[in-house]
Amino acid sequence: MRVAENLNTALHALMESRSDLYVLGEDVADPYGGAFKITKGLSTRFPGRVLTTPISENAITGVAAGLALSGDAAIVEIMFGDFAALAFDQLLNFASKSVSMYGSRVPMRMVVRCPVGGGRGYGPTHSQSPQKHFVGIPGLALYEMSPFHDGLAVFEEMLAREEPCVLFEDKVLYTRPMHEVADPFTVTVADGVARVSLGEPPDCVIIAPGGVAHRVIAAMRSLLLEEEIACDLLVPARLYPFDVDVPPARHVFVVEEGTAGGTWGAEVAHLVHARHWNSLAGPVTLVHSADSVIPTAAHLEREVLVGEQAVHRVIRETLRG
């Protein structure tokens, strides 16, 4: 099963088990089934609860927040995560605040799905990874899809939080198989964190969201074969609040596709520093994309986005001095 199919299957299971759940978004109804076909078949099976909306991300998210406030549950599809900027007011000033600003806790069961990331030649306004802009908002939890986390379990966890959540889905993962990792690595999943390792004490630990995990694993393989550097990779399903049991390590790296400055990686580094400063050989190292808009041309896009070679180079230079 590929990642897109896993998400689609999860949504079908959720809609079947929860009669109060609605799905909203642009072109989410059949026969289109969403820009990336994640909602395929839902409107046919659950007419009346899958709502194709006008082109207004602010309105879509506001309606979902209203459904959540009235006791229902809602999942929103933002066609491209870049356009979540248009829904930012609803998330910052209404949905996240509604959990606690009325004097007692109000359950707000809503998920905003955001396809993000480059690698498809979609250009500057359809290829961004805007995760950092949502970090640190009280009452708003952030998740990211990965090939190692079952979509149904992640959706159920988000809805069980009873607070607004944003699920980032890197578009390049949609066609990738679930649970696949190349030899000699193995993957285990516990407490919402996937760990890709060789099964022996590593030279460094890498923390990365699901969208860049396959690039990091490729770099881990080349580091092992060419430099004899062994790495462990931690892939959390929940990005924020970040609560991952990072094993003590001399060197820790955080890899993300977003640009530098006020990033999720900086938040992770702050927490790792506080917990493991005595065991670290130096500061946590951040690896990210270039400070640039994302070009449409494939060869220029590769130069801007963080990739296997950049991860390999930064880790080699840090560990080898």
Image (cartoon, helix red, strand yellow):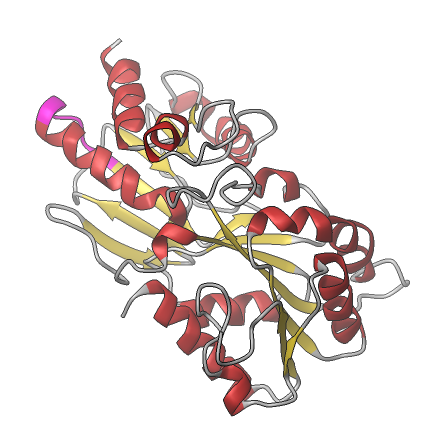
Write down the region rendered in magenta. 226-231
283 relative position to 82: left or right: left
Q: Position of residue 265 (x, y in %)?
A: 50, 33
219 lies above or below 278: below
Residue 321: within the magenta? Answer: no
Q: Residue at x 82, y 57 (%)?
A: 94
Point out the residue furthest to the right here: 103
Q: Residue at x 43, y 74 (%)?
A: 8
Q: Position of residue 298 (x, y in %)?
A: 34, 35
248 relative position to 319: left or right: right
Quadrant of the image for the N terminus? Answer: bottom left
Q: Nearer the viewer, residue 50 or 13?
A: 50
Point out the residue furthest to the top here: 321
Quadrant of the image for the C terminus? Answer: top left
Q: Position of residue 116 (x, y in %)?
A: 49, 49
86 relative position to 98: left or right: left
- How many labels sit on residues? 0
Q: Quadrant of residue 204?
A: top left
306 relative position to 315: left or right: right
User: From where the camera sits, is residue 107 visible?
Assistant: no
Q: Residue at x 18, y 32 (%)?
A: 230
Q: Nearer the viewer, residue 299 or 254?
A: 299
Q: Position of residue 178 (x, y in %)?
A: 28, 63
75 lies above or below 293: below
Q: Residue at x 62, y 68 (%)?
A: 25
44 lies above or below 124: below
253 lies above or below 314: below
Q: Quadrant of residue 248?
A: top left
Q: Nearer the viewer, residue 293 or 94?
A: 293
User: From where the camera sits, is residue 31 visible?
Assistant: yes
